[in-house]
């Protein structure tokens, strides 16, 4: 890919240049404007370890990068034109792409998995459009609990109370080049949802990575701690990452006929259904992520599908031809968007190529469909299914797959070790006074 020579906004003294790591967290560097031209031409060196660390920045020996090879460098190059941060005068931000020292793609860059599926779709004649909806909590940074109380989903009074922080999130992130469609209070105190306008798949995924880091920065500037953790409070609503897919050909929505989901759309749904269970780790890589998956919580527990039905795993939105789309609802807001979208697209494209047909449509409560194929509700099962999936390994790429599976397995190991080495309050309450 040719290097881009991007001009800086007037008055810029510092540029933030970053990209998504193995967990979809944006990491990078702050660069003086005086050095920007050199960065555009030659890139910026940083360790490939960026793609081989977990969310805590823990490093371990992986198949691609380790102590044995010294954790070598790669380069990142600007991918997008720098845009000024409205809340930090003189500072601009640019999204980057990674390149190995051999000028080839880095095998453990998760973005590559999505690139392959987008290219595959293009070979089939399709352009992939993706819309994203992310939920997150705004918390008191000292107590780590919501500042407000009670559930006020869609509540305009609650929205007004939060406008001092949500208003800047909408308007200023929009100024940063991420088109925000709307925001609203969600189904818990402190919980909100912000929707990003649909775009082509790679752009949509890049925007999710940048959006999460910008939300955290803006929230901090207004006295809040923002978290995209999947289930911060067990008794409250979890944070979902709902993804809307449509394929376009010749300027027309390939999923739509007269405002209804057509045969190609049904094929796509069938493919996604087939792989939802074995690809579950791409939507939830932690123990916490599976705490969302409870019946009657608006988070799916099976692969059911239906028209405008929020109890199913795959919700179909119909209307005008341009509006017809497939919404997949199982992922957590903390998932890696590149791996999530890559797996979903690969499955859906398989469905189209193989002419698959989905299960009977669910017209009622998806949680009560007894013969529906389940999706994992715990990380151990998700890992087992993913480890048995040659399909997932092929989609992600063998080296990337092994690294990501190690992240998931380490998370499960940390949790199991913690539980095994403490006496819980439940044990004390149950046994202390009775034995």
Image: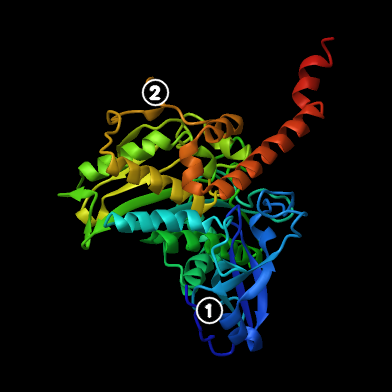
In the image, 428 versus 104, the foreground residue is: 104
Give the residue at the far top of this rendering. Answer: 435
**Which quadrant, please, contains the C terminus?**
top right
On screen, residue 39 above or below 282: below
In the image, 252 versus 164, the foreground residue is: 252
Q: Which mark is residue 82?
A: 1
On screen, residue 13 above or below 195: below
Residue at the image point whose x is 66% and y is 38% from the top: 409
User: Under tag 1, what secondary structure?
Assistant: loop
User: Which residue carries the number 2 mark?
Assistant: 368
Q: Upstream in the sequence, badge 1 or badge 2?
A: 1
Q: Nearer the viewer, mark 1 or mark 2?
A: 1
| Residue 217: percent from left, percent from top | 62, 66
Answer with left or right where residue 41 lies relative to residue 275: right
Q: Are marks 1 and 2 in contact (CB under 8 Å)?
A: no
Residue 283 appears in the picture as rendered: no
Residue at the image point whose x is 47% and y is 77% from the top: 2
On screen, residue 354 above or below 419: below
| Residue 212: percent from left, percent from top | 56, 59
Q: Residues within 10 Å of mark 2 (few under 14, many from 20)?
A: few
On screen, residue 94 above or below 150: below
């Amino acid at each position: 890919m040719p290097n881009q020579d991007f001009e800086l906004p007037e008055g810029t003294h510092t540029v933030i240049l970053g990209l998504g790591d193995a967990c979809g967290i944006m990491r990078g560097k702050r660069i003086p404007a005086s050095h920007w031209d050199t960065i555009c031409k030659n890139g910026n060196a940083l360790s490939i370890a960026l793609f081989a660390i977990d969310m805590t920045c823990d490093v371990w020996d992986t198949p691609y990068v380790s102590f044995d090879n010294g954790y070598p460098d790669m380069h990142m190059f600007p991918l997008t034109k720098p845009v000024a941060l409205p809340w930090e005068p003189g500072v601009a931000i640019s999204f980057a792409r990674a390149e190995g020292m051999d000028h080839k793609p880095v095998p453990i860059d998760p973005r590559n998995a999505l690139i392959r599926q987008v290219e595959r779709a293009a070979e089939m004649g399709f352009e992939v459009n993706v819309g994203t909806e992310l939920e997150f909590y705004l918390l008191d940074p000292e107590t780590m609990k919501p500042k407000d109380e009670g559930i006020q989903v869609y509540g305009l009074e609650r929205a007004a109370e939060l406008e001092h922080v949500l208003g800047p999130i909408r308007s200023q992130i929009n100024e940063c080049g991420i088109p925000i469609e709307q925001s609203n209070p969600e189904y818990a105190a402190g919980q909100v949802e912000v929707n990003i306008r649909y775009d082509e798949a790679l752009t949509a995924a890049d925007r999710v990575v940048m959006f999460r880091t910008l939300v955290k920065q803006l929230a901090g500037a207004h006295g809040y701690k923002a978290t995209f953790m999947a289930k911060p409070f067990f008794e409250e609503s979890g944070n979902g990452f709902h993804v809307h897919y449509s394929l376009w050909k010749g300027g027309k929505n390939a999923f739509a006929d007269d405002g209804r989901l057509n045969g190609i759309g049904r094929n796509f749904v069938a493919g996604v259904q087939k792989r939802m269970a074995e690809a579950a780790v791409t939507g939830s890589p932690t123990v916490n992520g599976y705490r969302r998956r409870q019946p009657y919580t608006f988070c799916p527990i099976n692969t059911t599908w239906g028209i405008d039905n929020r109890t199913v795993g795959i919700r179909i939105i119909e209307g005008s031809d341009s509006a017809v789309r497939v919404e997949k609802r199982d992922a957590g807001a903390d998932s890696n968007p590149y791996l999530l979208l890559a797996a979903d697209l690969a499955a859906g494209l398989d469905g189209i190529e193989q002419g698959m047909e989905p299960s009977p449509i669910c017209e009622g409560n998806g949680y009560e469909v007894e013969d529906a194929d389940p999706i994992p509700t715990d990380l151990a099962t998700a890992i087992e299914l993913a480890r048995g999936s040659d399909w997932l390994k092929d989609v992600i790429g063998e080296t990337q797959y092994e690294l990501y599976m190690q992240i998931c397995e380490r998370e499960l190991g940390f949790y199991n070790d913690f539980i095994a080495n403490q006496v819980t309050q439940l044990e004390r309450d149950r046994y202390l006074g009775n034995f």
